[in-house]
Amino acid sequence: MNSYLRSPHIKYNSGIDRVKMKEYPEDSVKGSAAPFSNMLNSYYMDPTDPCYEICQRVIRDMTQYGVCVLNNFLGRERGLLVLNEVLQMYRSGIFKAGQLVSNPGCTDAQTIRSDRITWIDGKEPHCYHIGQLISQVDNIILKANKMANNGKMGDYNIDGRTKAMVACYPGSGSHYVKHVDNPNKDGRCITAIYYLNLDWDVRKYGGLLRVFPEGLNQVADIEPIFDRILFFWSDRRNPHEVQPAYATRYAITLWYFDSHEKAAARKKLKERGEASSSK
């Protein structure tokens, strides 16, 4: 993990903590380039597999810290191809102001988060290289989830994920206050964030991701540097914030679903809907 500092007392932002269940843009990993959806948890992974060392690192760090950071994930050439696709999308004007899951129409949303986002599935004609990135992340998450001796990764049955959220913090102090991705058991168990920021100097540009791991009197400070990927548990174990950015900052985020928690969330949502309609 990256540098650690002492943590202030964790306070959840009330506007984010009051989450109402909502369906996320979801794209099942079944049938994707990561063909492991029907694999037993006793899957044996050959140590010569190119993903073996990465999966071992993910399992180790997620089990020990709840956070895993990997540098040079795609390599510079492939990372630049992804960045070019993101820049083209941003220039096309399809990015919209990020909303709060807890209250999509909230008038205070921009004080809580000031990023601009778009959702994609990676199959669009202009997103070929982003699609390859998504497939590679799927591959690692699913293999680490299914292989033997998989630590806390084995606590989940991962069979789906959201679409990719491509986000831009357009400088001028844009930020996202401290929050939890999944405080109310909506099914998301792992957050994966890929960064695309060339020559990023956090001392000049800010934009640091600060994670406040539960139960530790420390924080994890993660600089959003080019071709770095970050994994962490999506629930209350990892409150986090994006500190004000003073240069344009790009990231691609995926959330992976645990099938059991997702089914329970859907059941609860359905029951609430039926109760509401019967009044």
Image (cartoon, grey):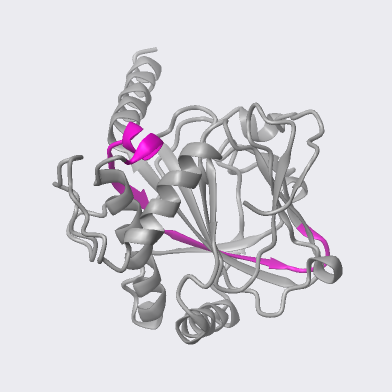
Q: Does the magenta-highlighted stretch encompass residue 182?
A: no
Where residue 5 sits in the image (x, y, percent)? 79, 44
Q: Does the magenta-highlighted stretch encompass residue 173?
A: yes
Q: Please report the residue visible at 36 percent of the width from the left and 20 percent of the height from the top.
A: 277
- Give the magenta part as a residue range: 150-174
Q: Front-most of 84 and 6?
A: 6
Q: Please report the residue visible at 75 percent of the width from the left and 29 percent of the height from the top.
A: 11
Where residue 235 sits in the image (x, y, percent)? 52, 34
Where residue 102 sits in the image (x, y, percent)? 58, 35
Q: Front-most of 163 and 82?
A: 82
249 to the left or right of 204: left
Q: Is residue 58 above or below residue 273?
A: below
Q: Is residue 260 above or below residue 193?
A: above
Q: Front-most of 50 and 186?
A: 50
Q: Is residue 268 above or below residue 182?
A: above
Q: Is residue 29 above or below residue 12?
A: below
95 to the left or right of 204: left
